[in-house]
Image (cartoon, rainbow, N blue to C red):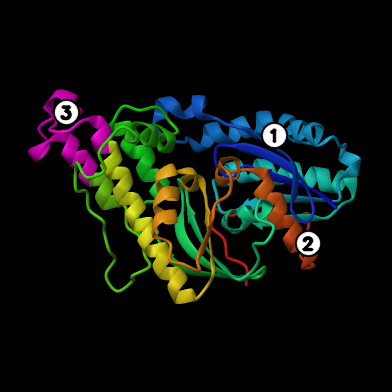
Amino acid sequence: MLVLGIDTSCDDTAAAVLRAPREVLSNEVATQYDLHAAFGGVVPEIASRAHAERVTLVIERALHTAGISQADLGAIAVTNRPGLVGSLMVGVAAAKSLALTLGIPLVGVHHIEAHCTAAMAEHEDLDYPFLALVASGGHTAIYHCRGPQAVELMGQTIDDAAGECFDKVAVMLGLPQPGGPSVSKLAEHGNVKAVRFPRARVKHDPLAFSFSGVKTAVLYYLKGPGGRRDAPDRADLDVSYEDVAASFEQAVVDVLVQRSLLAAEQAGVSDLVIGGGVAANRRLRAVLAERAPEGLRVRFPSPALCADNGAMIALRGAEMLRSGIRSDLDLDVSATGELAR
């Protein structure tokens, strides 16, 4: 069966075609970085308007790249939670229209569950149970994926997401968005031990994350004692911007790795899957490869499947369809959403 996956959960308009169960035939994404750059973050109203302008074209590109027509599709999978409500509505409306017109099944997909399973498209031997770390601009959490309809939250951030911190630090350093790749590129030429930024622990919850402290620590380091500098000035720092970026990145990576390996040990799994935009971070990949104990396989998707994309939505949707799950045409959207049980 050919499944069309649509994702408009935030600021990327994405569509892909999957030949079930795991063969990705196309994966098209239209980004909005240029539209939001001046604001230092995603503006929901601008994002939803851009989705409305682009979603039809992106779907057509996905079908063309896959070498198929609408008539060849067997089902539509679309993100309906969690995300920006206005953005989600655009993708769900497009999916409903196609499903109704073509007379094929529709299934609403949980965006984070899709990130958990994205690596399955490129690791044929990956199967349940496994542990998944999802780290992105809006989410940082660890899930025990026991089966297709049994996903358990083990730990999550109590404040900022890891990707959000990368974006905010990029603004502090005057770097372009998206912040994660910009900070990581600068960090390649820095010393990870130049500044000892905090690695926060959450009292009574060893698997929880907290990143607001490290973000604030970078701000105070750049502004100087007492916040005397209105704006970061390289000449006033004891170390280079490269060193600040590298030290910050290492602090975030240390926390992500420590919590993930602890959770994998507690869950007793042999596979650790990393998903979300931060999964493309080279430092994270290197440190996990170095610190993972023998017997634990760390599975990363390719960078194209780390960021928001339609392929992971189609893959997760195909999995749900095989389990007999369908959505009606009254499918609603939600800024939050329950995990599969």
Q: Which residue is mark 3?
A: 230
Badge 1, how many Cα within 10 Å: few under 14, some, many 20+?
Answer: many
- Where's residue 210, x and y in %? 32, 57
The magenta stretch is 217-244
| Count of number-bearing discs | 3
Mark 2 vs mark 3, CA separation in Å? 55 Å
Q: Residue at x 60, y 71 (%)?
A: 129
Between discs 2 and 1, the one toward the N terminus: 1
Q: Which residue is mark 2?
A: 321
- Where's residue 99, x and y in %? 83, 48
- Where's residue 299, x and y in %? 55, 56
The quadrant the C terminus occupies is: bottom right
Tell me, yes or no, if residue 330 can be seen here. no
Between discs 2 and 3, the one toward the N terminus: 3
Mark 3 vs mark 1, CA separation in Å? 41 Å
Relative to 164, residue 28 above or below: above
Indicate whether residue 254 is drawn in magenta.
no
251 or 175: nearer the viewer: 251
Query: Could you tell me what secondary structure mostly forms the magenta stretch?
Result: helix
Q: Which residue is mark 1?
A: 55
81 or 196: nearer the viewer: 196
> Hey, what amino acid is under mark 1?
Val
Badge 3 vs badge 1, beta-carbon distance below 8 Å: no
* Closer to viewer: mark 2 or mark 3: 2
- Where's residue 31, x and y in %? 57, 31
32 or 233: nearer the viewer: 233
Q: Secondary structure at mark 1?
A: helix
Left or right: residue 285 versus residue 241 is right
